Image: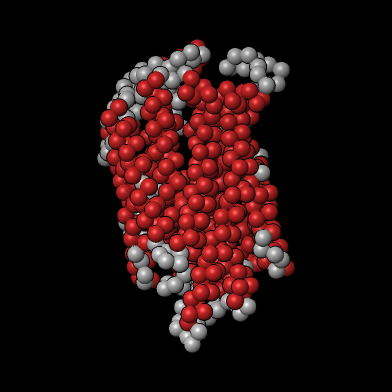
Amino acid sequence: MKRLYLVEPVVALYAFSSFLIYPLVQQYVYRRLWEQLTHTPYPVSDNTSRCAPSNISSNHTDFHKDVQKQASLFSLYSELLTTAPSLVVTLVLVAYSDRGGRKITIIMPLIGTLIYTTTFLIVSFFELNIYLLIGASFLSSLFGGISTFLGGCFAYIADLCHDDRQKTLRMAGVDMMIGLLSGVAAISTGYFLRAAGFNWPFLTSALCQCLILIYAVFILEETVKKTPVDGGTLDGPQRPTLRQLVFGLCQIFARASSRCKRVLALLMIIFTSFSFAYIGGISLVTLYELNEPLCWTEILIGYGSAASTTVFLTSFAGVSVFTYCGVPRLLIVTLGILSVASGLILVAFAKTTVLMFVVRIPMLLSIMPFPVLRSVMSKIVSKSEQGALFAYLSFLESLFNNVGSAVFNSIYAATVGWYPGFAFLLAAGLLVIPLAALGAVALIGLDVTTEPRKAEDSTSEEDGRAENDNDTSPLLNPSSINGSAAPC
């Protein structure tokens, strides 16, 4: 069977299967908690408003607060239990992919996701204790998570793309693919739930994940030639596997000049702090929409999720247009951060359905920083260190995403009683950190393509010179987006 160097179908189906159930997870937990705490059926009719005033409106409001708090704490417990194993697996697998191949970083998370989805289907079908889902989350995290999957996919793309502009656009294309398919899934989720309940969406998602596994195992081609067990390596003498992983991660900074180290560290601070605030704030949106005074139904939540996923499409268009026009990459990142900040501030004050949809407009460019920062950092390190770089990024992204979600869920649980929008304002305020780090990178003004690397092996050094003979453009130079990938 002919194999393909095309990872986008894997990403597309993974996005569809994940977002088909992602909006349902919080809704399912919310409904089960509602039934447990209120001892009444969850209202699902369009003619019934859970926010409608009644003779027991005071108790009704208290029920909302209790359910919101317990649902938020459920998410917190799940994040805390799954963060550590997912981080370790992400770091080891993506770093190991430099020698063992990229496909393992794609296949393992798919197996974990399939286990989680299947468990969710069993819990829903037999109406088992919902806290079994936390155990399923922990088990699936032992196979890695979405950061492991995306880290492997981005490293896979970095292996295939030698032109910096092509790399940026293809990475942005992956983000766009996520948005396109997740939007389709989000729109269908509400109607699927209304027509067939929770079981059929979970079953459909599990079947999609089986198809992805078949494609990844039998059709997707490997981009890395595995190091022979009994032969020499390209990077010197053989080391034990664990030492090889640690050595590969340390090489990123050890071989770089001091200025390259500072810029790379600042770029990672920008990436992680932005991810922390953005994911932390966005993770609360569904709970916020279920709460008073919005009280959205599953149909509205589906449309809201679909509207949110359009940012992947518009961000891809933004990166493409700004890249074509020669806009400096740091300016593209700045625009993306400001887009998120303005949207989160508006969410904090949104009290009507119309306004809740309108707040999506300022956030249309919110995904732009991710592919641009990945591309810039990929350009700084050598080709032999791409897996180690994306292991670092996936590790940090997973860490700050999970911690951010846990922190903001706990903050939301503590503040929902007096001001539900406080967590969104806090997330917007924290975006000052990546903006300040961007200013520091701009002041350094480092030409990453002309900085020498320290103690690099002769093969990598020759490759680096061959790639960079005609590339002397700095990070802030608009033309640098068209330069070839180059190490420090």
Residue at image point 60% right, 69% down: 33
Q: Using the image, determine if residue 35 lies above or below residue 259.
A: below
Residue at image point 36% right, 42% down: 433
Q: Position of residue 96 (x, y in %)?
A: 61, 30
Q: Foreground residue, 293 or 4? A: 293
Q: What scheme was used to colour the molecule?
A: secondary structure
Q: Position of residue 405 (x, y in %)?
A: 50, 52
Q: Position of residue 72 (x, y in %)?
A: 54, 61
Toward the bottom, the furthest residue is: 55
Q: Foreground residue, 258 or 103? A: 258
Looking at the figure, which quarter contains the N terminus?
top right
Q: Position of residue 415 (x, y in %)?
A: 45, 61
Query: Within the image, what quadrant is residue 487 found in?
Result: top left
Query: Within the image, what quadrant is residue 219 found in?
Result: top right
The answer to whether residue 271 is left or right of residue 440 is right
Residue at image point 56% right, 55% down: 76
Q: Using the image, determine if residue 396 lies above or below residue 361.
A: above
Looking at the figure, which quarter contains the C terminus?
top left
Q: Could you tell me if residue 338 is visible in this image? A: yes
